[in-house]
Image (cartoon, rainbow, N blue to C red):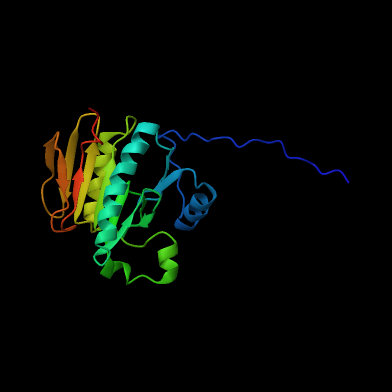
Amino acid sequence: MVQSVDHRKSLALNIPEELALQVTPAQFAVLAAENRDLRLERTATGVLIVNPPTGGETGNRNAKIITQLGVWGEANDTLGIAFDSSTGFELPNGANRSPDASWLARERWQTLTPKQRQGFIPLCPDFVVELRSPTDSLKKLQEKMQEYMENGAKLGWLIDPKNQRVEIYRSGQAVEVLENPSTLSGETVLPGFTLSLQRIFPS
């Protein structure tokens, strides 16, 4: 018996910004499940955002951020749960977002059912990090950070390695901009957490 072989190759679909593709929450869940190598996001109005895999330098920097957050999180696991960049959150405004690193207070995590914990987490994280890559639009990242704050985040860091700049977002406060800081404090949201930027900013 001869078996047929499908020689078709997968092709990437590039969606120009002017051709916004609208998807429902259910359609987004299917797309995300079928395209795990891509970081897909969905705006509050249903527009699909396709984020390609990061480059080597950005991926390495992000790993260092997540490692530091994870080490602190393990030592303080009664306070909350840390997440990496592959974790999806469904914000109160309906958007689906995946911060580069995030953290959620344990008492909020414990309100979720086992099913909710397995899918897109239906909460906004208490703490978020966005790491700007060379191709990221600063304006869009700033808009995303504001969206996190408007949906319940308490603290957020927008880290721009190229310009060695950090924008700190706090709930109900003006954005603070730090030029070439060596460390960042988790303040009262992540008590005792300090992020070293020594190996994240280019020397």
Position in image of residue 99 (x %, y %): 32, 48
Using the image as rendered, state which of residue 3 and residue 80 is in the foreground: 80
Using the image as rendered, state which of residue 173 and residue 37 is in the foreground: 37
Residue at 64% across, 35% down: 9
Residue lying at the far right in this picture: please name it: 1
Position in image of residue 155 (x %, y %): 19, 53
Left/right placement of residue 147 relative to residue 26 reads left
**Number of marks drawn:** 0
**Image quadrant assignment for residue 198:** top left
Residue at 19% across, 32% down: 164
Position in image of residue 58 (x %, y %): 34, 35
Is residue 73 in sight in this rendering?
yes
Using the image as rendered, state which of residue 43 and residue 104 is in the foreground: 104
Left/right placement of residue 51 relative to residue 82 reads right
Residue at 29% across, 59% down: 74
On screen, residue 76 above or below 166: below
Is residue 144 in sight in this rendering?
no
Position in image of residue 53 (x %, y %): 43, 38
On screen, residue 53 above or below 105: above
**Image quadrant assignment for residue 77:** bottom left
Quadrant of image for the C terminus: top left
Residue at 16% across, 58% down: 191
